[in-house]
Amino acid sequence: MSELKLLSVVSEIYPLVKTGGLADVAGALPAALKAQGVAVRTLVPGYPAVMAALGAREEAFYFDHLFGAPARLYAATAAGLDLFVIDAPHLYDRPGGPYTGTDGRDYVDNAQRFAALGAVASGIGLGLVPGFVPDVVHAHDWQAGLAPAYLHYASGRRPGTVMSIHNIAFQGQFPASVAPLLGLPAHAFSMGGIEYYGTVGYLKAGLQLADRITTVSPGYAAEILQPEAGMGLEGLLNQRRGVLSGILNGLDAAAWDPAADSLLPSPFDAKRLDARAANKAALQARFGLPQEPDTLLFGVVSRLSWQKGLDLLMDGLGTLIDIGAQLVVLGSGDPQLTERYAGSARVNPGRVGVQFGYDEELAHLIQAGSDALLVPSRFEPCGLTQLAALRYGALPVVARVGGLADTVIDVNEMARASGVGTGVQFSPVTVPALQNALTRTHALWQDKTLWRTLQRNAMATDVSWDRAARAYAELFRNLARERAA
Ligand code: ADP
Ligand code: GLC
């Protein structure tokens, strides 16, 4: 097997900068692909956190002018990742997040900031850095959506392009006035190009012009062909369904290993499930809840947003209280939801505990200490928290959508008979169905022997990256072969 060179293009990467699962995927896939003979370099914007983390770096290119000012491209390593970093202080050197300022609002020049990412990716694809000329360019989400477009409109030999959808709800749409700034030929601003209902659509551009399209679960790949989940792009996706596939995400096995997790008071594994109890006690203490081993403890680790369906949990909370359960929530995001959760903790002392903000350690403790992890998402391209829950023996209670449906086996009668259940699914994604799932979970909890079996089933689920990496590697190889022919 000859080594294939892949340029991964992404706007966040764990552990350097992360707002969600996209960073986890971008951070874990390179090592998994390496085992499949794919050499990955990842192109990321030089945000302050990225620049600060760089080890030895080498200037790979100098741009006299990159969307407004000079910039440098560095080849560097950080946290074991091989990177290309765009050092463009006028675009990326600011306080705040990767997409929003300290006021929580989108940066006004996001169109330029991520056009630069696409343009530099294209440049590398066309041979800007002689030491690394990729066979395939892999663009993640709208922020990288222009990479396939720049490559499509370039002349000469180009690498294959793959556009991966992690969340179709975020599309990177900008006013038509952005089009002339991009340095693409004028005819690119058309229906067959980057134009999207009179605007410029970065994700649309990638979906239109990439050689292949992937998304992060087979279930979501099917859902986005329908209007309910396609968010306006279902027509285009149906036209291109021949090149669309779903590849289920894995979980970073080193970062999420209950037997060797330094963030836990009491590491454990499927053979030492008793050691899990100390984590539950620590978790209850952390949230000021009574340390009752026999009380069913539900956990949530999530962005607080409409997608995640956490308003439904607030609406259905009465059931959770009625069955005598406890709830701990770690989340950040929507201010209104934050207020509702804070309120519910106030009126349910000893039963509901909340913490807001981003806390890696607490996320691990919740996975290791809660009995069940709730993920009531309205839609979920893949979802990583239910994968961690499986690995940590917190039974996932999930909405039957997207990647949640693909990764959790509902403990129905049939699954029970054949002993394969790993969690609870509910559908439709409504308050009554969620409440019913809470009650069902509580009924399962009463049977301690069954619960243990389910935990062991869950923990035996293969959530590694191997299978996905094999699927990506095959897709990249086929594409590279096709381009070479
Ligand atoms: P999404 O990317 O849609 O937010 P995923 O389930 O794919 O959902 O990924 C979420 C990732 O972010 C997981 O690694 C999860 O553990 C982490 N996470 C979410 N919220 C928090 C939080 N408040 N603190 C720490 N980690 C969080
Ligand atoms: C997005 C999706 C999530 C998925 C993640 C990584 O953030 O919302 O479902 O797991 O990307 O692919």
Image (cartoon, rainbow, N blue to C red):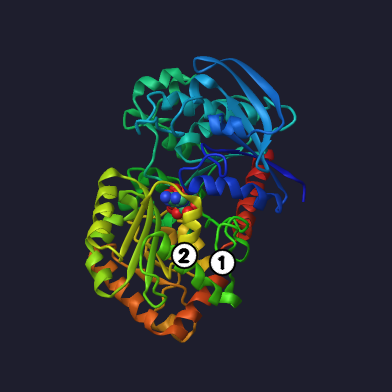
Return the x and y of residue 404 as percentages of the image width and height. 42, 62
Determine the residue positioned at 38% across, 69% down. Answer: 297
Tell me the kind of residue under disc 1. Ser
Q: Earlier in the sequence, mark 1 or mark 2?
A: 1
Residue 105 seen from this side: yes
Determine the residue positioned at 37% across, 73% down. Answer: 296
**Split into 4 quadrants, where in the image is the C terminus?**
top right
Return the x and y of residue 452 as percentages of the image width and height. 49, 80
Q: Image quarter for residue 222? A: bottom left
Q: Nearer the viewer, residue 476 or 248?
A: 248
Residue that carries the numbered disc 2 in the rendered image: 282
Determine the residue positioned at 59% across, 57% down. Answer: 468
Residue that carries the numbered disc 1 in the rendered image: 266
Q: Nearer the viewer, residue 424 or 315?
A: 315
Q: Image quarter for residue 399? A: bottom left
Tell me the kind of residue under disc 2. Ala
Q: Is residue 280 left or right of residue 139?
A: left
